[in-house]
Each structure stands twice: as structure tokens, then as C-alpha cells.
Amino acid sequence: MSEKKIVLKSSDGKTIDVAKAVALQSQTITHMVEDSCVGNEIPFENVTGQVLAKVIEYCKKHVVVDGETLTCKTVAHVIHTRTIDEIRTFFNVENDYTPRKKQ
Amino acid sequence: MAKISEFPDDLLIKILSFLPTKVAVSTSVLSKQWQFIWMWLPKLKFTNDYSNPIMLRDFISKYLPLHRAPVIESLHLKCNCESTEPEDIKQWVGIAVSRCVRELSIYRSVFYNAVFLPSSLYTCKSLVTLELDGNILVNVPQMVLLPCLKTCKLQRVIYSNEDSLRMLLSHCPALEDLTISGIAGDNMGALVVNVPSLKRSSLYKGKTCSSSDRNVIVTPSLKYFQVEDYRENVSYLIEHMPNREEADICVWQDIDKFLESMTSVKSLTLRVLRPVYLPVVVFNQLEHLTLHISNNYWSKLLVRLLKVSPELRVLNLDVDKYGRYDEYQTVIWNNEQSSVPECLLKSLETFRFSGYERREEERDFFSFFFQYACCLKYSSIFR
């Protein structure tokens, strides 16, 4: 996975380096990246450095965890909160142990 | 979502990695597909199951040698029951060491037999974190080297001889974080901490710990230092620590030596157990001072401290309600400009006082303090 960075430039000349994955949490930034990518620097002529910093702070907190991790954590939660029989039912797991092996 | 029975083993292992070890182990009965998945988990945490301590011990003894993960990243053992024999724990630690363990944490209650550790632990090339708490014998062999150890916590453990601790610490070239907590009868001997790489250190010695010869602290890279030593007959030799940023001192003896070693500190917490004379020092970079006091004439010590802390911005004062203040007689503060602490006039912005009981010394101090603290932005006084 590449660690691509984007540079955001505010109206008062401040620049903020941000990982692409984080920046793309914002619809606005995504559109601007698609429309007007001059190298890797995106100008925000109507937004001050202070406001831009706050936006990026928000984006960092809401980065979506990758799908695989989310799935695993969900399954783990199910396992943690149910009995063995309930888990088998929930996930359609067939108990293929012969009766002697069952503990 | 695809059927779980179609998940590759890697994914099942990842699922179990989000569960407590005990729950992960229980999935082995789900089906044949799940039988050995838990045995690939790199992080294992076994805490006592009070309902079935013997079963747990038998289980670990049987399955740990067969564990399939090529690397056991972490092993946590909390074994405070009789049925877990010292031999068991020694064997389990040995297995973890042979599987390149990075983090080892063992707790053993003082009510059960002391645990001793395999000598292979003391030459473990992969160990990064070692936490030993309780009735554990630290028997450092002649050959000792822990090249990757960064964090070491030894709390209430026992040492096989008085040189063990020094031997151990002097063979940890990458050690950054050290916590040592003594206990009566631990055979620790003198506290010799000579570790050039150390950045954080917390030392605790209760009143009943044995008093010993010179305790030596040589830690030139130290940033954070905490010491609590209630022993009455000890002495310290402390080398100057230029990088010290934060210190928390609570000692009965040698407080002047501690203060002399940390003149570059930015944040200082001082718990004064008895009347003390300040050495001749200046805290040029001190910005935060917290003082806990419980005896007469604390205001004199405080004003002396203020005089040698020209950059102080935050002052927290905590007066012990149960301290002894009955011998105080009015102190007349010298109101000449040259005697007023510079930080009151130029830098002090925040003042917090806790334990206010309207005692005479408190009132005298306030009238002096508030007269000159002209930069205060925030001030609070609590009972």
C-alpha cells in the first residue's frame, strides 16, 4: 500500500501534509483532487490555515478501518458474546467432530 | 459475507487475535476446522481461572510445547494459585524464550512458592519488555545479555544475591524505561542504576526495606525520574542529569543531592517529608512546580524555591491536612524588591492551593504572595 501524501495549501499560505487516505475522507478534497491536481498540491483559496487544520483533524479521527479488519472484529465480537452452540448456529458451522472427541 | 467455513486459516487466526486467550481457546471445539487455529496465536495471556486452576495448569503444560506459532510475541502469566508449581512456570517461560518472545509478564502472589526463571531468559535476544511482579526469584547468571530490552519492571521481586540487580541492568544496552519497587527482605542490596540509555525511571523503597550502602544513580540520558524512598538511613550518589525534564521526588534522606542533580528540570514534584534545607541551586528551566508538604515553615522553603526558579509559570501547593503546623511563629517577609522572587513579578501565571485551613502560616504566605504575583491569570484555593 503506498503512503501517498497530499499537500493542502490554505488561503493564508500555510501548507499541511496529509496522507492521501486521510484526506479523501472529505468529499470536497476528493473532488478537488480529481479536478485540479497540480502536482500534489491542492490550493484552498477560501479556507484559512486554522480551519483547514481542524478539517484534517476530523478526517484523521474518521478514517474507515479496512474491510478485512472490520469483518474480523465483528466475527470476534459474535464469538465473544455467544455460547458455542449459538456460534455454530450463527455462522452455520457444522460440528464435524465424532461424538467421542467432543469435550 | 462469505461463509465462515470458507475463510482461510490466516483470517481465522486474525479473528481470534481480537479475543481474550481463554475465549480463543474455547473455539477449538466448534469444528475440526477450528481445532488448532488458536495454537497459531502469537500473543498469549493466561490468567488464573479460579474455578479450575488445576485444569488451566494441565492445559498449558500440555499445549504450550505444541504451540504452532513460530514466534510467541507475548506471554502473560498471572498465576496466583498453589497448583501452578514453580517448575511449570519455568518450563513455560523457557518455551516462550525459545520462540523468540518479545514481551514477558509474570505475576506471582506472595502467598505461594517463589518462582524461578530459566537462565535462557537472561540471554534472550528478542526480549523487549520484561515485567516481573511478586514472589519471583531474580537469579541472574554469569552470562547475561538482553540486547533488545527496552522496558523492565521489577516489582516486589527477590534477588538471589546483592549484585544481581546491578549485573542485570549493566547488561541491558538498550534499556529506556525502568521501574523498580523494593520489598522487605528482597536481598536487593544497594541500588546501583548505571544505565546510559535510560530515559524513564521509577524507584520505590518502603520504610521496611533494608537500608544499604551508597545507592548510585548514573543515568545521563534520563528525562523522567521518579523516586519514593521512605528509608531513614540511606545515602545516594547521583550524577548530574542534564536532560532531565520531569522529576517527582519523595525521599526522607539526601533530598539536597537529588535537587542538585536536576537543575535543568522543567517540571518538578516535591513531596517534603520533613524540614529540609535547600542546596545552592538554580532551576533555570523550571516551569511547573508541585509541592506536597506536611510540616511547619513550609512557606520558607517555598519562597526559597520560588527565588531560584526565575521562569516558573505554574505553582501547585498541596498542604497535608494531617501535618504538624503547631510550631509556626510569624514570618516577616522581606518586602524589598530584590528579595521578591522574580517569577512572581514576571512569569507565574497559575496558582493552585489545596488543603487550606486558614492557618496562620497560610494567611501570612498569601498576603506576601498575592501582593507580588502580578502576572497571575488563574488562581484557585481549596480546603
Image (tube, coloured by chain):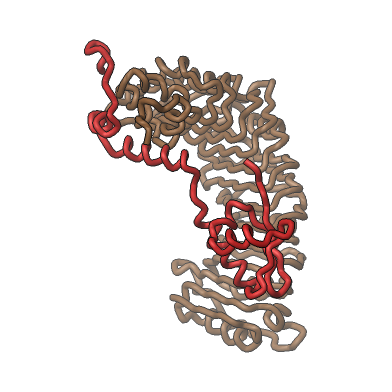
On-image quarter of the C terminus of chain A: top left
Q: Is residue A73 above or below residue B64?
A: below
Q: Among all residues in the image, which is located at the extreme front?
A: A35
Residue B112, position in %: x, y?
A: 40, 28
Task: Describe residue B46's horizontal placement relative to residue B306 as left or right.
Answer: left
The quarter of the picture where residue A17 lies is bottom right
Q: Is residue B354 visible?
A: yes
- The colour of chain B is brown
Q: Is residue B80 visible?
A: no
* Residue drawn where x is 23% and y is 10% of the image: A100
* Residue drawn where x is 45% and y is 28% of the image: B13
Residue B329, position in %: x, y?
A: 57, 80
* Residue drawn where x is 71% and y is 45% of the image: B217
Residue B343, position in %: x, y?
A: 70, 78
The quarter of the picture where residue B265 lies is bottom right
* Residue drawn where x is 65% and y is 63% of the image: B267
On-image quarter of the N terminus of chain A: top right
